[in-house]
Image (cartoon, rainbow, N blue to C red):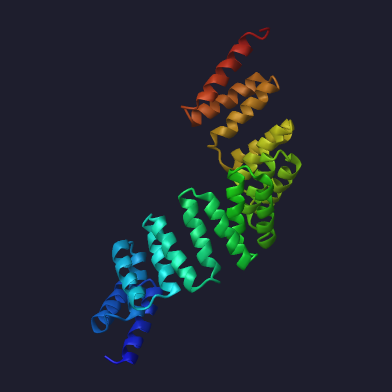
């Protein structure tokens, strides 16, 4: 089979591959490799196909054969991707680092290493690689977002806010970024900013249950109980089975000394979640206080 014939077959296999017609692609890849066992493109593409089929060990075998003949950054990256899905992040990191030696300006490789370090809770290393991504591409949304998440978990709220704000500048209609920015402001106890960004989140995604819930909690922090009630009712409109919303409404009405409403909401929370210990406790106290108003 001539080189041109092999290339034509690979082109056909790749069309099948991209179309999701994996069995047909596999037949052609295997046929090419019978004719030309060292064909690096066939080895790599077949390895990618096997990866997609979750045959990770076989995928590794074929991509490693491609690397042995032609050690390119692209092949090392593909090998790293297999190790990620095989839940072997340390092996993935080694592959990505080898790829970086060959392609030091590929910011995607640094991002992949950041993800891999994050998966094994090595956050300082993840930060270093995400920062390297931003040196190469300052507008890389996911790097800013992931840095925001790490800094928020580490309670470095100013750094978290900085990266969330940059991510929101890049993608101003991203409701998840907006929500996390609001959460960071709330944890920083900058409640007015938190309210502003929760409301912005809800403009972007009106039925975002978590945004409504967190906005309600922020109103409680601000002792603005009427707005908190409205938001918890909004949560229930979106998800009538949210037991925590009913529980929190019970707490608000308890504090307002409207024990009948408090009892009703605690009972609803328990109807939805019979194992809700706090709701049982608060319901018992509410019944006691109702029956003993002078105590």
Q: Is residue 152 left or right of residue 101?
A: right
Q: Position of residue 199 (x, y in %)?
A: 71, 47
User: In the figure, 277 relative to 82: above or below?
Assistant: above
User: In the figure, 57 relative to 207: above or below?
Assistant: below
Q: Is residue 202 visible?
A: no
Q: Dividing the picture into quarters, in which one does residue 256 lie?
A: top right
Q: Position of residue 124 (x, y in %)?
A: 55, 51
Q: Position of residue 229 (x, y in %)?
A: 68, 33
Out of 122 and 21, give the one closest to the viewer: 122
Q: Quadrant of the C terminus?
A: top right
Q: Residue at x 63, y 25 (%)?
A: 251
Q: Is residue 116 visible?
A: yes
Q: Dividing the picture into quarters, in which one does residue 248 lie?
A: top right
Q: Quadrant of the N terminus?
A: bottom left
Q: Is residue 112 left or right of residue 84?
A: right
Q: Residue at x 69, y 44 (%)?
A: 185
Q: Residue at x 33, y 70 (%)?
A: 64
Q: Residue at x 69, y 19 (%)?
A: 257
User: In the figure, 56 relative to 74: above or below?
Assistant: above
Q: Residue furthest left?
A: 34
Q: Position of residue 192 (x, y in %)?
A: 76, 42
User: In the figure, 108 relative to 291: above or below?
Assistant: below
Q: Residue furthest front?
A: 101
Out of 108 and 55, give the one closest to the viewer: 108
């Amino acid at each position: 089979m001539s080189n041109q014939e092999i290339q034509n077959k690979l082109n056909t296999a790749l069309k099948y591959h991209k179309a999701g017609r994996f069995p047909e692609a596999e037949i052609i890849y295997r046929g090419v490799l019978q004719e030309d066992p060292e064909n690096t493109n066939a080895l790599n593409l077949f390895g990618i196909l096997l990866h997609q089929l979750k045959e990770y060990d076989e995928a590794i075998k074929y991509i490693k054969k491609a690397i042995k003949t032609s050690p390119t950054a692209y092949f090392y990256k593909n090998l790293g991707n297999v190790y990620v899905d095989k839940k072997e992040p340390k092996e993935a990191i080694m592959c990505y680092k080898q790829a970086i030696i060959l392609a030091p300006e590929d910011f995607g490789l640094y991002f992949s290493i950041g993800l891999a370090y994050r998966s094994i809770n090595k956050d300082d290393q993840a930060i270093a690689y995400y920062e390297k991504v931003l040196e190469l591409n300052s507008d890389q949304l996911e790097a800013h977002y992931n840095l925001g998440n790490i800094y928020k978990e580490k309670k470095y709220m100013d750094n978290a806010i900085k990266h969330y704000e940059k991510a929101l500048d890049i993608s101003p209609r991203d409701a998840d970024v907006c929500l996390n920015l609001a959460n960071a402001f709330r944890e920083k106890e900058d409640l007015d900013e938190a309210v502003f960004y929760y409301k912005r989140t809800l403009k972007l995604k009106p039925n975002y249950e978590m945004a409504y819930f967190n906005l309600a909690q922020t109103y409680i922090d601000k002792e603005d109980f009427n707005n908190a009630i409205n938001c918890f009712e909004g949560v229930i409109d979106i998800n009538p089975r949210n037991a925590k919303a009913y529980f929190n409404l019970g707490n608000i009405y308890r504090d307002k000394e409207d024990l009948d409403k408090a009892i009703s909401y605690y009972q609803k929370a328990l109807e939805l979640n019979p194992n809700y210990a706090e709701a049982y406790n608060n319901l018992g106290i509410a019944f006691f206080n109702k029956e003993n108003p002078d105590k």
